[in-house]
Image (cartoon, rainbow, N blue to C red):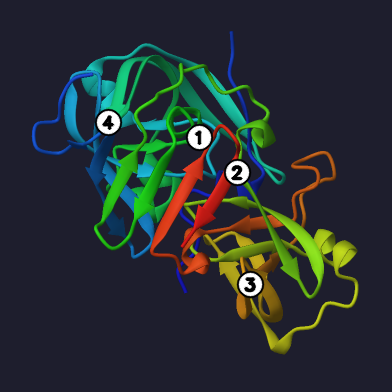
Amino acid sequence: MNAALLAIAWYGLLFQIPAAKDFGNLTTTTGKSTELPFRLASGFLIEVEGRIGTQNGLKFLLDTGATISIVDSRIADKIKLERRPAESISFDRRLTWEVTTVPEVQFGQISAQNVEMLVGRLADYSEFAKKADAIIGMDLMKLCNFSIDYDSKKIVFQPNQREYTPATGEPLSECLILELQVQGHSVRLILDTGFQGLLLYEERLLNRVSMLRTSGSPVAVSVGGRLQAKQVVIPDVVFGARNREVSALLVKAPPSDRLPGIDGVVGLTLLKARRIHFDFVEKRLTWE
């Protein structure tokens, strides 16, 4: 199975940060909307082309599980960006980074100036990100509503862009939350485009679904080479109007003060959708 890419949310990371030009043929305008081609990296990751400062033709991975965007240290070196220390807090470890202010970031309809981004070697962060130049998180994606069309392999941006503001350090204020029914009980999941399947915090899930039913025997697996999990099959899971049996990873929940009220993470692939609509103003997700 493929493990997670950049699922900042399912690691429970809280970031602590101390004190538009055209792309030629890449973007097209249809009526009042802007379209941007994308490709599926590793079969599920949304990869688009973008620009950071003077560096064009960069590979961006869109990750709704990240609260703040990350630029690879290679790109930061080329632009000669000044940096300062930063760290992120996982529920089981601390990670050290650098943070910088990027003069401009652009992809498709979205363009923002003086963007605070983390700096690090993405290849060290995840094997899935080793060819990426940047990870675009919710701090930039929320600037414009858009749809992902899997049939045409295009992202369709709505015309109105909101003003960029740095990430607050409060992950839940940035995240899209998807509510599912598991055996008749509601569970709340962070939508993470950097994750392929369904990951659930076991203790929190059992608090909501005390008589949880699974099919077959659990299988011990390692997620990302370090997080131990149980792979189970859970029947009677409702996605929209569909009742399905799904495979899920069960992991130890983070401390109660981390991501309170959140029961896990879900990726886009489980929606089995042809088109997904992101409304960041209403914090609503719809699909067809």
On the image, the x and y values in percent for residue 184 come to 81, 72
Dividing the picture into quarters, in which one does residue 70 lie?
Answer: top left
Residue at 57% from the left image edge and 51% from the top image edge = 191
Q: Residues within 10 Å of mark 1 (few under 14, many from 20)?
A: many
How many marks on residues?
A: 4
220 shown above or below 139: below
In the picture, the disc for residue 248 is: 3
Residue 74: numbered disc: 4
At horizontal 23% and vertical 18% (from top left) the residue drawn is: 20
Q: Could you classify mark 2 by the number of other residues whose Cα lies within 10 Å: few (under 14), some (14-19), or many (20 or more)?
A: many
Tell me how far mark 2 sits from mark 4, CA to CA: 30 Å
Graded by Cα atoms within 10 Å as few (under 14), some (14 to 19) or many (20 or more), the crowding at tag 4 reads: some
Left or right side of 275 for 14: right
SS for tag 1? helix
- Pointers 2 and 1 in contact (CB under 8 A)? yes
In front: label 2 or label 4: 2
Instruction: State the residue lying farthest toward the front.
Output: 31
Question: Compared with residue 219, is residue 40 higher up or lower down, i.e. above or below?
Answer: above
- Residue receiving disc 1: 138
Q: Which residue is mark 2?
A: 176
Q: Secondary structure at mark 4?
A: helix
Q: Amino acid at mark 3?
A: Ala
How far separated are the C-alphas under marks 1 and 3?
Answer: 24 Å
Q: Percent from the top left, x then y, of residue 204?
A: 83, 59
Distance Cα–Cα, label 4 vs label 1? 22 Å
Q: Earlier in the sequence, mark 2 or mark 1?
A: 1
Residue, x 46% and y 69% (percent of image)? 272
Give the spatial CA distance, label 3 vs label 2: 20 Å
At mark 3, the secondary structure is strand
Question: In the image, which is nearer the foreground, mark 1 or mark 3?
Answer: 1
